[in-house]
Each structure stands twice: as structure tokens, then as C-alpha cells.
Amino acid sequence: MKSFINIFLISTLICGASSAYAQDSYDAQNFATSDLNGTARFVGMGGALGALGGDISVMSTNPAGTAIYRKSDAALSFSGLFTDKSAMDHGRARMSFDQAGVVIAFEMDEPSSKGLQFVNFGVNYQKHRNFFSNQKTDIQNLSVFDQNGNPFNLSQSFQIANLCNEAAYNNYWKGSLVDMAASSSQHGGILNEFDETLVDGNGNPILDGQGNQQIYRVYEGVSARNAYFEKNNRGGSMQADVNLSFNISDQFFLGASLGVYDLTYSRESFYSETGVDGNSYNIDSWYKTEGDGFDIKLGFICRPIEDSPFRFGINVHTPIWYRLTDLNGATLTYKGQSTGYMASSYNAEYDYRYRTPWKFGFSLGHTIGKSFAIGAEYEVEDPSSCHYSSVDGGDLTYFRNTNRIIEETLHAQHTLKVGAEIKPIEEFSIRLGYNYISSPFKEGAFRTIGYDGIYTETDYTNWGAINRFTCGLGYRYKGGYIDLAYQYQAQKGDFFAFDDENLKATKINNNRSQLMATLGFRF
């Protein structure tokens, strides 16, 4: 008689109690990435205001940009995020509060004089990252051929079986996936298991100290007939910047920002697989991360020719130093010829530290009177330098290996931003912008999962480059203004439900649109 096996596991770990964590290079890259957010003017020009300045949100990229202000400014922004009907998302819309900030300009000397002319102080709170996305994918290309040309079907259970064999060899069963899978296999679960005799290089049995043959447990996966995957990502990160900037002789501009970040991220995933033997299993997983961090941003803008509006900017961002808390868990449900079984559950949580890479930027800007402005910006950061560590300095081997895997998976990421603004009349502005962001993943990157980790998922996506197109409109009347902006982001990715050298990628898209508005007042 067919029955269900339900194996429930809430897998978290008391900080410092063990070396089992669940960090990897894909979460490291995810938390190091930022979106194009801020005021509608900033977004409409593609964020290419590093040298132009004069916008509240520029303190998050080049802090010297607020030194351009000669009047104080306050702004409030809202947006709606819309996703395409694709494998990644299914036409969802989400409204959000995006930005609130103020810059106070303090005039020190007459504008025509040399020396310190303005000291400006600003505070800005804005969205840093939106994690919202949904994915539904039928896993393709499960049927392949071996080296001899014989057909066979791939399966997630092959990867899990390899992890179980490593766990058996090391006699360590605290990893989430191996604990669930091995427990189910004792009752006819997703893996086949049997005993083998340990032999030497000549095929002779290896004996223990009492002269007995050494026996070890072997696990095998079952080929899959079909598979299906879903994932829902939620949450985001917000940043608050406190900024101080200086205008020297209206030719040199200096600035610094202290950034504080609040990160909340969660995901739920569902993987379903039916084997060629007719048996099937599901894995429902959940994962949550929350914490906070801080960074320091320094900026400089110069007009090299005193009588020319042309200027260039340089900015440096330190890493964001986070302290994070993770919780994750999973439920494995097996349907086959077996008796019912419920495994014991355990609860805990684990804390750790995480550091994003340094970021460096160079920008150019030029204006023609008050009717035209154009800016360009280049940024570079190296996600392979993302770094995990424990809160108490322990578990050095685990985190050293994790950081080494990050170096092997990721490489430098380059960002190009261009933007322009034209004013056909003094009160009305038209804006355009474009961003290109290269992929941070090395060719052939894959997700490394250890048998001793608190992992409940095997999927990963190698995302390609981002192309982002922006436009906007602005209207000013006396001291008040209203700005509108639209951005469209297109990105392709190679999705893998599990790691197998024979598994071909499933192509997915992450295309999204954002419409936003800013209300502001200069005084």
C-alpha cells in the first residue's frame, strides 16, 4: 500500500556550537548587489550623477555631489515594481516607499570669493535592494547519455546520495539534506542503500583491529522521469546615509557619507521529482536572513578648468560590514511503497559576519548653460572578495573554505552608467539613462554544497549581464517640483535545479519595470 513519508527538519544552529552553516557564494553575491534606486531624477538619468551632483540620492554614490547645492532640498519618493510574465515572474506588481531625504546648504563666503563657500549637511533614507521575485520552472533535459552512449536520466537524488556517502565516510550526519535523505532511506525513501566491504587498492578486504572486515553504508540515487521547481524571494535592504560635503572655491568639492543598512531576506522553494520507478518526493524549503551593517563612502569632484562647467568625480566605498542571523529548514515528503515515518525535529539559529567588496567609481559631467546636462560613470567591484566569518572568531576552517569557494565562483563586476537631461523650457525637464552591469559569475560556476552544512536546497542560477534603460520627466514651479521616472531592467540566467555535469541549463529571464515619482521642495 502506498503511503507518505514526512520528514520535518527545522535546521538552525546555536552560534559557535558547530561548524555547520549554510553560507555560499550565491548568497554572498546576492547580498553584495544593489539596485538603481533613489529620487526619480536620479533614476531617470540612470544614476549617472557622480560628477554632476545636485541630487539628494547622489550621496549614496559620490558623497561630494551634495556640495554642488547652493539651496537646501527635501524630497520624498514612491514607486511601483512590475515583473514580466516569464519563467522568473508571473506578472506581479508591488508598490513601495523608496526614498526620503534632505540636504541643508550653509553658505560660508560670497559665491565670487575663493576658499570655503558652502558646507552642506544631508540625510537620506532610500531603498538599496529589492529581493522580490517568483520563479516556476519545469526542469528540462533530464534525459542524457553516458560515455558509452547509453541513455539514462539525471536526478537531484544523485547529488544527495553523494553527500550521504561523504557523511557516511566521515560519520557526520548533522547536515540537513543528508539527515533528511538518510532517515527516509531507512524506510524506503528517496535513496537506495546497501552495505559494502571496505577494500584496499588490490581489492582485498581491509580488516579492523579485531580482524573483522570493515563494512560501510553506500547510498544510490534513483533516475528522475520529470521534475518541477518553484521559488519565491521576498524582502529587501534599506540604507540611511548621513552626509557632509564642502564646496571650495566652486572648483573643488569634497564629501563623505556614513551608511547604515538594514537587510531582511527570505525565500521559500519547492522541488518535486518523480523517479523512473514511479516513486516521487517533494522538498519544501525555507530560508531567512536578517541583520544590519554599515559602510563609509568618500567622494571628490573637480572642475579642472575654472571657466568650464566640465568636471570629473572619484568615489570610494568601503565594504559593508554586516552582522547577520540565518534560519532555514525543510520538509521532505516521499511517496512510494513504504511505511509511514516521521523524523524528530530540532531548532536553533546561527549568527555570522559578512563583508561585501570595496567599490571604486570614476565619473564625468558637463553642462551647457541651464538647459542641458550629461553624465557618465564607471564603477568596479570584485564580489570574489566577499568574506564570511564567525562572530566569535571560531570555525576558521569552514569559513576559510567558504571564502575560497567564493573566489573560485565570482570575479570582478563592471558597471557603466550614462545619463542626460534637457530642459526645453526652464520649468520642464526630459531625462534619459542607461546602465550596463557585467555578470559576476565565472564561466561554468556551480554551487558547492558540503555534507556537513545546514543546506536545504541544491538549486542555483548563474545570472548574466544586466541592461537597464531609464527615462524621466520633471516639472518645477517656484520652490516645488515633481519628477517621474521609469526604468526597465533585462537580465538572462542559466538555472540549475541541482549540480550535475551532465545537466544542461534551463534558460530564465529576470525582466522588471519600475515607475516612480518624487515630490520635493528647494528652500
Image (cartoon, helix red, strand yellow):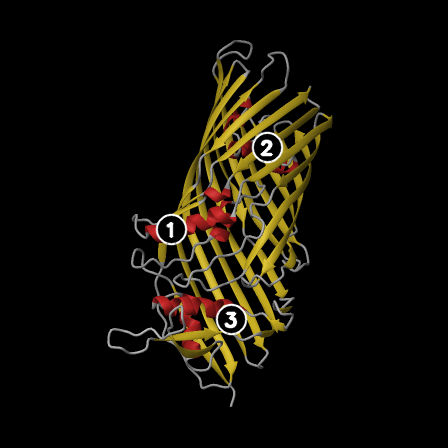
Which residue position is annotated with label 1?
A: 399
Q: Position of residue 110 (x, y in %)?
A: 52, 11
- Which residue is at the front of the view, 158 or 235? 158
Q: Position of residue 303 (x, y in %)?
A: 58, 17
Q: Tag 2, which secondary structure?
A: strand
Which residue position is annotated with label 2?
A: 378
Question: Which quarter of the rendering shows the C terminus?
Answer: top right
Q: Residues within 10 Å of mark 2 (few under 14, many from 20)?
A: many
Which residue position is annotated with label 3?
A: 157
Q: Tag 1, which secondary structure?
A: helix
Q: Is residue 158 above or below residue 394?
A: below
Asked whether residue 74 is in view, the answer is no
- Which residue is at the front of the view, 259 or 227? 227
* Residue at x 34% of width, y 68% of height: 171
* Residue at x 49% of width, y 22% of height: 254
Indicate which disc residue 308 carries. Answer: none
In the rendered structure, which amino acid carries the disc numbered 1?
Phe
In the rendered structure, which amino acid carries the disc numbered 2?
Tyr
Q: Residues within 10 Å of mark 3 (few under 14, many from 20)?
A: many
Asked whether residue 56 is in view, the answer is yes
Q: Is residue 48 above or below residue 8?
A: above
- Which of the two labelled residues, at mark 1 and mark 2, occupies the earlier sequence position? 2
Q: Is residue 370 above or below residue 98?
A: above
Give the mark toward the camera: 1 or 2.
1
Q: Residue furthest front?
A: 202
Q: Tag 3, which secondary structure?
A: helix
Q: Image check: 437 left or right of 62?
A: right
In the rendered structure, which amino acid carries the disc numbered 3?
Ser
The span from disc 1 to disc 2 (Cα, nearest Å) is 32 Å
